[in-house]
Amino acid sequence: MIKGTKIYSIITFKCPCCHEGDFFISHPYNFKFTGDIYENCTVCGKKYMLEPGFYQGAMYVSYGLGVLLFVSIWASCNLFFTSIGAWSQIGIFSFLIIFLSPLLFSLSKIIYANIFMKFDANAKSNYIKSKI
């Protein structure tokens, strides 16, 4: 993964602008703070909440991730494990969607933020200069 790409920010859960500061307050499976983000980046000062209700659009990304998970389970069961029935596939999907929901929730937020925020290699130095 190359720093400066959107996939780097998404996989490492880092700031979409500087790729150094943390985006989330804690790990997705820390249920007390699942999906909670910092107000501003701790490194470059980028404001994460661009407008009130900004992350409501992440629901569409979450829906897409859920569909992707369903299609991948359905395709792998029908291609590689032909003896698995429909109810077993539904059970596998239900178990995985419940188990992966905190991760999918966090992924949808960071993906949505990366759609609207761009990488700036000088973000950290500009922020430091502005504080002086």
Image (spheres, rainbow, N blue to C red):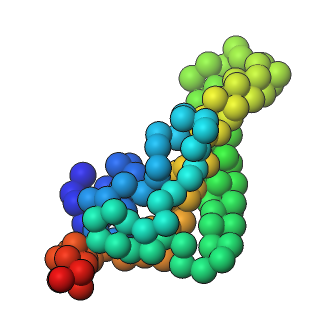
Drawn side of residue 15 relative to residue 25, left or right: left
**Residue 76 drawn above or below residue 69:** above
The residue that appears at 22% across and 72% down in the rendered structure is: 124
The residue that appears at 54% across and 34% down in the rendered structure is: 29
Front position in the image: 71 or 27: 27
Which of the 4 image quarters holds residue 96?
top right
**Residue 22 drawn above or below residue 93:** below
Drawn side of residue 40 relative to residue 57, left or right: left
Drawn side of residue 88 relative to residue 102, left or right: right
- Residue 35 in view here: yes
Picture coordinates of residue 45, whole percent (x, y): 35, 73
Residue closest to the far right: 87
Front position in the image: 18 or 1: 18
Residue closest to the far top: 83
**Residue 5 drawn above or below residue 14:** below
Front position in the image: 48 or 132: 132
The residue that appears at 21% across and 57% down in the rendered structure is: 2
Residue closest to the far front: 132
Which of the 4 image quarters holds residue 21?
bottom left
Question: Which of the image's four quarters has the C terminus?
Answer: bottom left
Picture coordinates of residue 76, whole percent (x, y): 59, 30
Drawn side of residue 117 relative to residue 105, left or right: left
Front position in the image: 105 or 123: 123
Picture coordinates of residue 91, whole percent (x, y): 76, 23
The residue that appears at 67% across and 46% down in the rendered structure is: 66
- Residue 72 in view here: no
